[in-house]
Amino acid sequence: MRRARRTNTFSGRSRGGRAAARAFTFLVVLCLLLFAGGGVWLTRFAMSSVKVPDGSLYFNIERGLGVSQVARRLEGEGLVTDARAFVILVRILGKSGHIKAGSYQAETNVTPLRLVDKLTRGEFAQGQIQFIEGWTFRQLRAALDAHPALTHNTKDWSNVEILEQLGAGETHPEGLFFPDTYHFSAGTSDLIILRQAYDKMQTVLAQAWDTRASDLPVRTKYQGLILASIVEKETGEPTEREMVAAVFINRLRKGMRLQTDPTVIYGLGEKFDGNLRKRDLLEDQPYNTYTRYGLPPTPIALPGEAAIYATLQPAETRALYFVAKGDGTHYFSKSLKEHNRAVNRFQR
């Protein structure tokens, strides 16, 4: 009887141990399944791409933001679909303390995993803007205002306020900014870009002025800039710049009016509808070089480096006229009689 009781007691404990082991095993398997399921869910999230509107999006991460705040920022920008999942992803990857403040650019089809990599490596966005030869300052400002990666400090400023902030001695902004491609970090102030363009124009103009031809009828660098802007607008074929400049230089030397359409068009401003009429050439205004002698009061566009050097080192010729031939080039004439024949030939 005693042996039987010992056997029953041992059997009960054995069954209880096996039950506990099975329960523990079930819990382990359940945890593994849950972990695996969570891993699949997180992997799918990490590799899921988001289509960025317009192909790219600039966004800022301010200093001091925690992971949760960064995640909400990205969710608000439409770059991730689940801020909570992004936080988990960052923490599992061990990147919680590695997110760097700065300006970033997200490309289309970006994934959360790529965003974590970008933010923790500090792959800050680089923007660029191009100012084109022959643009007016109004066109330049429109390009600045439209650029999504710039901070638009000057958007509501007047032209005079911009010049004052730059410390410029000029009172009119036209032609003062060098046409070029400017690279910058996202979030850069548009005033910084303007300062770079202004300083570069001053440098290029000074260098060209130091190598200018002797006995030019332009007496100051600013006058050279004015004439260079006209040469820029009148030149369609780059190889003709020195000849176009020479015609205007020769006319100034002889006291002739420049009689160039681009200055009249500039003076008309927004009234110009694309069609220059005879009455426009006859109506006197400061930029009408058909009614006034000498240079207009300011440049009329952004002259490029080639136009500046061509103006200050013009071709040696006695030509006083030129007329468009219809193929982008011009016919140059030394006399009015020859010019009228060329007009009849190429335009009438």
Image (cartoon, grey):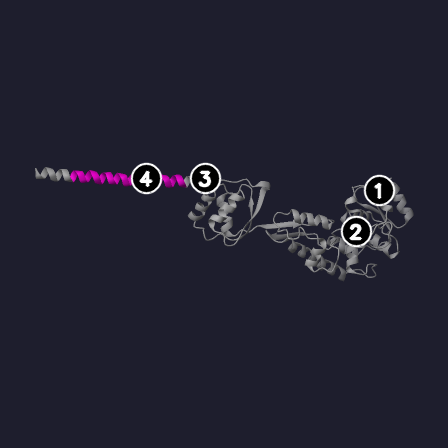
User: 40 or 174: which is nearer to us?
Assistant: 174
Identity, as a three-letter code, of the amino acid under mark 2: Ile
Q: Earlier in the sequence, mark 3 or mark 4?
A: 4
Marks 2/3: CA distance?
Answer: 60 Å
Q: What residue does disc 1 label?
A: 277
Q: What residue does disc 2 label?
A: 230
Coordinates of residue 109 in the picture (x, y in percent): 54, 41
Q: In this view, does 257 lie to the left or right of 299?
A: right
Identity, as a three-letter code, of the amino acid under mark 3: Arg
What residue span does the magenta drawing correspond to?
Answer: 10-38
Residue at 46% across, 41% down: 45
User: 317 or 20: which is nearer to us?
Assistant: 20
Coordinates of residue 140 in the picture (x, y in percent): 70, 49
Residue at 76% across, 60% down: 209
Residue at 87% across, 46% down: 282
Marks 1/3: CA distance?
Answer: 66 Å
